[in-house]
C-alpha cells in the first residue's frame, strides 16, 4: 500500500508540473494574442500559432504513434519463439527481473518524451514548412543541376527536415523494439555475434531497411546541397567535388537502396549475410568517399589548380556578387589632384558644413552630462540623419531622452509601472558646429523641447524606445509623471491608442499571471480605462511582430513634419542556402534590406514597408503574411525622406566587395588585387574603420549634394588608399552603390598613413603631450576621408577630457590635404591655413 501511494504521489507531482507548464503557456499565448490584436496583426499570430502548434502536435502524435506501434509489435512478436539465452547468460544481466517489471511504464513514458522532443523540434521548423508551401522562384538557376535557386532556399531545407524527422522516428522506434526484445530474452548481442528469434530479426530487419532507405535519401540531399558547400579557395563545389564526391554520393545512394532491399528480403532468403555485407559496404564507402575526394584534390587538382578550378571560381564570383547585391556596383575613376582652392570650397560649401566633427562616443557622453536633466533619464545612442533646417540641407546627430527605471529614486511598483512610464524628447544638433567652450550646439534641446529652427516636436513622449523596460499601465488613478519643471513635476494622462485595455477581473488576472505580479490584480489605481503597454523595446517589439526578419541593431529616431517621433529600423531577409555564395558567420550567404520598419514612439504602431519588391524571400513572406506588409509608396513622404542605407548591410557588402571586385578568376585565385577596410585609431584603440554618413556631391553622377554612406579601401597588405565605396541614401537614387577607383600608379594616402603623419608632426605632437598632462587626456576622434570634387581631405577632431571621465570638449580639428597638415580650433581655420 505505501508503495502504491508513493507511485500515486509521484504521478500527481508529474501531472501538476505538466499542468503548470501548459497553464503558463496558455497564459502567455493569451497575452500574446491580445498584443498582436493591439497592433493589428492577429493574422500573424494565428498563422504562426497554427503552424507551430499544428506541426508540433501532428509531428509529435505521428512520432508517438510510430513508436507505440513498434512497441506493440515487439511485445506481440516477443511472445513467439524460444529464449535465445540460457540461465547462465540470463543471470549475467543485472536486475533483469526488475527491469522487466519497470519496462512497460518506462517505455511508455520514454516514448512520450521522445515524441515530445521530436514534436518540439518539428515545431521550431514552422517557417520551413510555410516557406516551402509559398515558395517564390528566383528566376535564376544554378550552373550544376540547373535548378531554380528557390529550390535551394525553400525546398531543400524542407526535404532535409522531413528526412531528419523520419530518421528520428525510426531510430526511436528501433530503440524501443530492441529494448523489448532484449528484456524478453529474444535478442542478445555477444562476442560471438547477434542472436535473435526470427520474429525479432524480421522486425528489426524491416526497421533497418527503412533506415537504409532514409540514408539513400540523405545521400541524395547531400548531392543536391553540393552547390552550397564552402571551401577555402571559394564557395561552392570544385573539380574534386564534382568528379569525385558527386559520383561517390551516387554510389552510396545506390548501395543504401540495395542494402534496404536486402534487409527486407532477408526473412525470405533466410540469410542475413547479404544484407550485413551491404551495410558493411555502405559504412566503408562512407569512410572511403572522403579519402577518394582528397586523393583527387591532391594528385589531380593541386598540380594545376588554377586551370582545374577556373570554371568554379567564375561561378563563385558571379553568384556571390548576386547574393550580396553588389553585381550592379557602378565603378568610376577618381584621379585626385592637389588643386583645392577657396573657390572650390565655396562651391562645395554645403559639403564642408556637413563634415562630422562629433564622434558618437564623446557626443553621447556630452549629451548625457548636458541634457539628461534628471538622473532617471538616459541617452542610449547617438544617430545620424539629415533634415531641411531653415531651408538648408543639414546632417544632424540626435539622441532620444529615454527613461531608465533602474535609476528611479524610489523603485517601488507604482513608480516603475504606473507613474514613470515614458521618456521625453530628444537632443538634435548639427554635426559640425561647436560653441566657444568646445561643446555641441543644439537645434532641439531641453525639457520641454526648445527648438531654435523650423524643427519642432509636438509629441515628445517616448513610450516605446531602445531603453530596457518592463510593462507600464497608463490612465490609472495614479499621477503619470510627464516631465520636471523647476522644483515641480508636470503630470499627464496617456491619450494614445497603444496598449491593451485591462478592464475587468479576467484581464487583470491574466496579466497578473503573465507578469507574475499580484499587484496588477489587487491595485485600486487601475480603472476600466487603463491600458497596459508591454513589449516596448523596439528590437523586442519588432522581433515579436516579425520573427522571420532580422533587424538592424541601430534603430534611429525621426521627427515627422507634425513633430511626432517615429523609430525607423532596417529589416533584412537572409538565407544560408544560396548556391556558390560565400557565407558570413551569423549572416548566411544572401542578404537584402527588404523592409523598412516604422514604430510610433507614442502609440507603438508598427508598419512594415517593403523596399525590395524583387526579393523572392520577402515575396514568399508576403504570401504567408499578406496583411503584415505595405508598399514603400504608402510610407508618409516626410518619413520616407529619412530612410537611409543601413550601415550593417553596407559593411557586409564592403567586406564582400573587397574580395569579389576581382572578377577575373586568375586574379581572384592569386588574390592579386585583394582589398581591405583600413584600421582606425580611436581613444588609443585600433579597430576597423566603420562606414560613415556625410553630405556631398558625387561628381559626374550627382549635380547636387546628397546624403551618402561611404568607406575607403586600401590594398590588403598596404596602407595607401585604393578606392572608396558609397551608397546613395536619397531618392530617386536610393540604394545605388558606387565605387571610385584611384589610379594604381599614383600614391593616395590611406587613413593609417595620415594617422602616422599626424603622429610625426612636431607641432601637433608637442601640443598633444602638453594636453595629456595635468589631469586631462586627449581623445582622437575618427579620421574621415572627405572627397571634394577631385580632391581629398582628411579630417580628425580632437577632444579634451578630464582624466577618469568628464565632459569631452572639442578642442582642435586636424585637416590633412596633400602633404600639408593643419591643426586649428575649428574646421574653417584648418582649411584656410
Image: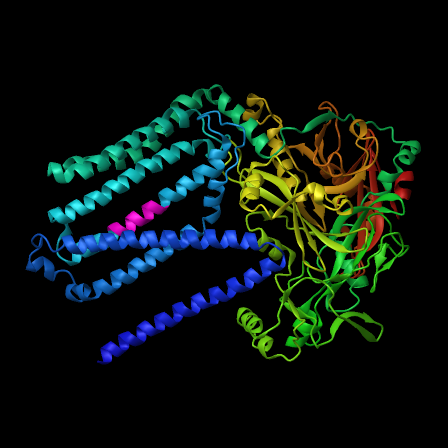
On the rendered image, what quadrant is the N terminus found in? bottom left
Total label count?
A: 0
| Left or right placement of residue 452 versus residue 6 in this view | right
Q: Residue at x 74, y 75 (%)?
A: 479
On the rendered image, what quadrant is the C terminus found in? top right
Q: Is residue 771 above or below residue 617?
A: below
Q: Is residue 339 above or below residue 211?
A: above
Is residue 276 in view from this perspective? no
In the image, residue 404 lies in the stretch drawn in magenta: no
Q: Position of residue 368 (x, y in %)?
A: 77, 61
Q: Quadrant of residue 348?
A: top right
Tell me which segment is drawn in magenta. Answer: 165-174
Q: Is residue 671 above or below residue 797?
A: above
Q: Nearer the viewer, residue 671 or 129?
A: 129
Q: Position of residue 95 (x, y in %)?
A: 17, 65
| Left or right placement of residue 290 versus residue 535 in this view | left
| Left or right placement of residue 235 versus residue 190 in this view | right
Q: Residue at x 28, y 33 (%)?
A: 285
**Predominant SS along the magenta part:** helix
Is residue 94 in view from this perspective? yes
In the image, residue 169 lies in the stretch drawn in magenta: yes
Q: Nearer the viewer, residue 112 or 655?
A: 112
Q: Is residue 772 above or below residue 300?
A: below
| Left or right placement of residue 127 versus residue 202 in this view | right
User: Which color scheme did the rendering employ for the protein?
Assistant: rainbow
Q: Nearer the viewer, residue 576 or 603?
A: 603
Q: Position of residue 588 (x, y in %)?
A: 53, 41
Q: Quadrant of residue 182?
A: bottom left
Q: Residue at x 36, y 54 (%)?
A: 60
Q: Position of residue 45 (x, y in %)?
A: 54, 55
Amino acid at each position: 500500500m505505501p508503495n502504491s501511494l508513493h507511485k500515486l504521489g509521484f504521478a500527481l507531482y508529474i501531472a501538476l508540473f505538466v499542468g503548470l507548464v501548459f497553464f503558463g503557456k496558455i497564459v502567455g499565448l493569451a497575452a500574446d494574442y491580445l498584443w498582436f490584436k493591439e497592433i493589428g496583426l492577429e493574422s500573424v499570430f494565428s498563422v504562426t500559432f497554427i503552424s507551430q502548434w499544428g506541426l508540433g502536435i501532428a509531428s509529435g502524435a505521428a512520432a508517438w504513434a510510430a513508436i507505440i506501434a513498434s512497441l506493440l509489435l515487439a511485445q506481440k512478436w516477443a511472445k513467439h519463439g524460444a529464449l535465445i539465452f540460457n540461465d547462465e547468460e540470463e543471470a549475467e544481466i543485472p536486475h533483469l527481473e526488475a527491469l522487466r517489471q519497470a519496462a512497460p511504464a518506462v517505455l511508455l513514458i520514454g516514448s512520450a518524451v521522445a515524441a515530445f522532443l521530436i514534436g518540439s523540434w518539428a515545431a521550431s521548423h514552422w517557417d520551413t514548412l510555410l516557406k516551402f508551401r509559398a515558395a517564390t522562384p528566383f528566376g535564376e538557376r544554378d550552373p550544376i543541376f540547373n535548378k531554380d535557386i528557390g529550390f535551394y532556399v525553400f525546398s531543400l531545407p524542407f526535404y532535409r527536415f522531413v528526412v531528419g524527422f523520419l530518421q528520428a522516428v525510426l531510430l526511436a522506434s528501433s530503440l524501443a523494439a530492441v529494448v523489448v526484445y532484449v528484456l524478453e530474452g529474444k535478442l542478445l548481442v555477444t562476442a560471438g555475434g547477434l542472436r535473435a528469434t526470427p520474429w525479432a530479426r524480421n522486425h528489426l530487419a524491416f526497421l533497418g531497411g527503412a533506415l537504409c532507405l532514409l540514408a539513400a535519401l540523405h545521400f541524395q540531399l547531400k548531392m543536391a546541397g553540393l552547390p552550397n558547400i564552402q571551401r577555402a579557395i571559394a564557395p561552392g563545389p570544385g573539380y574534386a567535388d564534382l568528379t569525385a564526391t558527386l559520383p561517390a554520393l551516387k554510389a552510396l545512394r545506390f548501395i543504401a537502396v540495395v542494402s534496404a532491399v536486402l534487409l527486407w528480403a532477408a526473412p525470405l532468403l533466410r540469410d542475413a549475410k547479404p544484407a550485413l555485407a551491404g551495410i558493411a559496404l555502405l559504412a566503408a564507402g562512407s569512410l572511403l568517399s572522403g579519402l577518394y575526394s582528397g586523393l583527387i584534390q591532391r594528385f589531380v587538382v593541386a598540380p594545376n589548380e588554377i586551370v582545374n578550378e577556373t570554371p568554379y571560381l567564375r561561378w563563385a564570383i558571379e553568384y556571390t556578387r548576386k547574393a550580396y547585391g553588389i553585381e550592379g556596383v557602378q565603378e568610376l575613376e577618381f584621379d585626385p589632384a592637389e588643386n583645392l582652392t577657396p573657390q572650390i570650397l565655396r562651391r562645395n560649401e554645403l559639403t564642408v558644413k556637413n563634415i562630422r566633427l562629433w564622434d558618437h562616443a564623446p557626443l553621447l557622453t556630452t549629451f548625457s552630462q548636458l541634457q539628461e536633466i534628471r538622473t532617471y533619464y538616459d541617452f542610449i545612442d547617438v544617430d545620424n540623419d539629415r533634415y531641411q533646417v531653415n531651408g538648408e540641407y543639414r546632417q544632424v546627430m540626435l539622441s532620444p531622452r529615454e527613461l531608465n527605471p533602474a535609476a528611479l529614486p524610489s523603485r517601488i511598483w507604482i513608480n516603475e509601472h504606473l507613474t514613470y512610464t515614458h521618456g521625453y524628447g530628444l537632443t538634435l544638433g548639427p554635426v559640425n558646429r561647436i560653441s566657444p567652450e568646445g561643446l555641441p550646439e543644439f537645434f532641439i534641446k531641453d525639457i520641454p523641447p526648445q527648438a531654435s529652427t523650423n524643427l519642432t516636436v509636438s509629441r515628445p513622449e517616448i513610450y516605446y524606445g531602445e531603453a530596457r523596460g518592463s510593462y507600464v499601465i497608463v490612465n490609472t488613478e495614479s499621477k503619470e509623471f510627464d516631465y520636471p519643471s523647476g522644483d515641480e513635476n508636470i503630470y499627464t494622462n496617456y491619450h494614445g491608442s497603444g496598449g491593451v485595455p485591462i478592464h475587468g477581473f479576467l484581464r487583470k488576472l491574466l496579466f497578473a499571471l503573465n507578469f507574475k505580479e499580484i499587484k496588477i490584480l489587487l491595485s485600486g489605481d487601475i480603472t476600466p480605462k487603463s491600458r497596459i503597454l508591454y513589449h516596448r523595446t523596439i528590437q523586442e517589439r519588432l522581433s515579436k511582430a516579425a520573427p522571420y526578419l532580422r533587424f538592424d541593431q541601430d534603430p534611429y529616431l525621426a521627427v515627422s513634419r507634425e513633430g511626432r517621433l517615429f523609430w525607423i529600423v532596417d529589416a533584412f531577409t537572409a538565407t544560408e542556402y544560396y548556391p556558390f555564395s560565400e557565407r558570413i558567420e551569423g549572416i548566411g550567404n544572401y542578404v537584402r534590406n527588404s523592409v523598412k520598419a516604422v514604430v510610433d514612439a507614442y502609440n507603438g504602431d508598427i508598419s512594415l514597408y517593403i523596399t525590395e519588391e524583387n526579393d523572392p524571400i520577402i515575396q514568399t513572406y508576403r504570401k504567408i503574411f499578406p496583411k503584415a506588409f505595405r508598399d514603400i509608396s504608402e510610407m508618409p513622404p516626410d518619413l520616407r525622406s529619412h530612410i537611409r542605407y543601413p550601415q550593417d548591410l553596407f559593411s557586409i557588402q564592403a567586406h564582400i566587395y573587397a574580395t569579389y571586385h576581382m572578377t577575373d578568376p586568375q586574379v581572384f585565385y592569386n588574390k592579386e588585387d585583394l582589398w581591405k577596410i583600413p584600421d582606425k585609431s580611436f581613444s588609443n584603440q585600433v579597430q576597423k574603420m566603420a562606414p560613415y554618413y556625410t553630405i556631398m556631391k558625387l561628381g559626374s553622377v550627382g549635380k547636387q549634394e546628397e546624403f551618402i554612406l561611404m568607406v575607403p579601401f586600401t590594398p590588403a597588405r598596404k596602407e595607401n588608399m585604393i578606392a572608396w565605396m558609397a551608397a546613395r541614401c536619397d531618392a530617386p537614387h536610393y540604394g545605388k552603390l558606387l565605387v571610385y577607383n584611384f589610379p594604381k600608379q599614383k600614391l593616395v594616402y590611406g587613413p593609417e598613413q595620415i594617422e602616422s603623419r599626424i603622429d610625426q608632426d612636431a607641432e601637433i605632437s608637442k601640443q598633444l603631450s602638453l594636453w595629456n598632462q595635468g589631469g586631462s587626456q586627449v581623445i582622437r576622434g575618427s579620421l574621415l576621408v572627405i572627397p571634394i570634387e577631385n580632391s581629398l581631405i582628411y579630417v580628425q577632431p580632437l577632444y579634451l577630457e578630464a582624466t577618469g571621465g568628464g565632459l569631452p570638449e572639442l578642442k582642435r580639428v586636424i585637416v590633412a590635404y596633400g602633404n600639408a597638415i593643419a591643426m586649428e580650433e575649428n574646421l574653417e581655420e584648418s582649411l584656410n591655413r
